[in-house]
Image (spheres, rainbow, N blue to C red):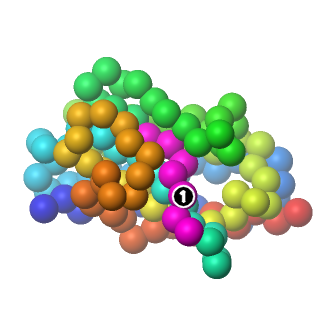
Amino acid sequence: QVQLAESGGGLVQAGGSLRLSCAASGRTSYVWTMGWFRQAPGKEREFVGAISWADRSTYYADSVEGRFTISGDSAKNTVYLQMDSLKPEDTAMYYCVASTNRYVDVTVAAYDYWGQGTQVTVSS
């Protein structure tokens, strides 16, 4: 069992920045990848980005690449999402995810553990 706790969400104006954090606890020795999904009202949950602890490689959705940066500390099983140049369309509930898979995957089914989410709202 792995528990994930997100923090750092809030209200920000377009063009602003936020930094989300996610700490994993429990049986973290099985966790190899961590990342983020988001879900806006009325829309499906979508992949944002993730990092693999195997080689610290990262992968981003096209919609956020160049604006968001994922980093982490594998020893602490903690991942961060630095969000810059935020747009109103980034408004969503952001969920931290973790997987026993060794490599990054963009599908919901690939992730074994999910946090409760932290709300990000970007005003125009």
The magenta-colored residue range is: 44-50
- 15 vs 26, left or right, is right
Percent x, y of residue 47: 51, 52
Q: Looking at this rendering, what residue extends furthest in the top direction?
A: 55
Q: In which quarter of the image is residue 112?
A: bottom left
Percent x, y of residue 91: 69, 64
Q: Looking at this rendering, what residue extends furthest in the right direction?
A: 124
Location of the C terminus by quadrant is: bottom right
Residue 93 in view in this figure: no
- 120 vs 25, left or right, is right
According to the picture, the residue beneath numbered tag 1 turns out to be: 46
Question: Which of the pair 100/87 is nearer the observer?
Answer: 100
Q: In this view, does 50 lie above or below 39?
A: above
Q: Quadrant of residue 108?
A: bottom left
Location of the N terminus by quadrant is: bottom left
The amino acid marked with disc number 1 is: Glu
Residue 2 in view in this figure: yes
Question: Which of the pair 65/22 is nearer the observer?
Answer: 65
Percent x, y of residue 48: 54, 48
Residue at (26% x, 25% y) in the render: 54
Number of numbered callouts drawn: 1
Q: Would you call the spot at circle 1 few (<14 residues within 10 Å), some (14-19), or many (20 or more)?
A: some
Residue at (20% x, 45% y) in the render: 100
Question: Which of the pair 115/8 is nearer the observer?
Answer: 115
Question: Which of the pair 4/31 is nearer the observer?
Answer: 31
Residue 45 lies in the magenta stretch: yes
- 41 vs 81, left or right, is right
Q: Main secondary structure of the magenta part?
A: strand
Residue at (56% x, 68% y) in the render: 44
Residue at (75% x, 50% y) in the render: 86
Residue 106 lies in the magenta stretch: no
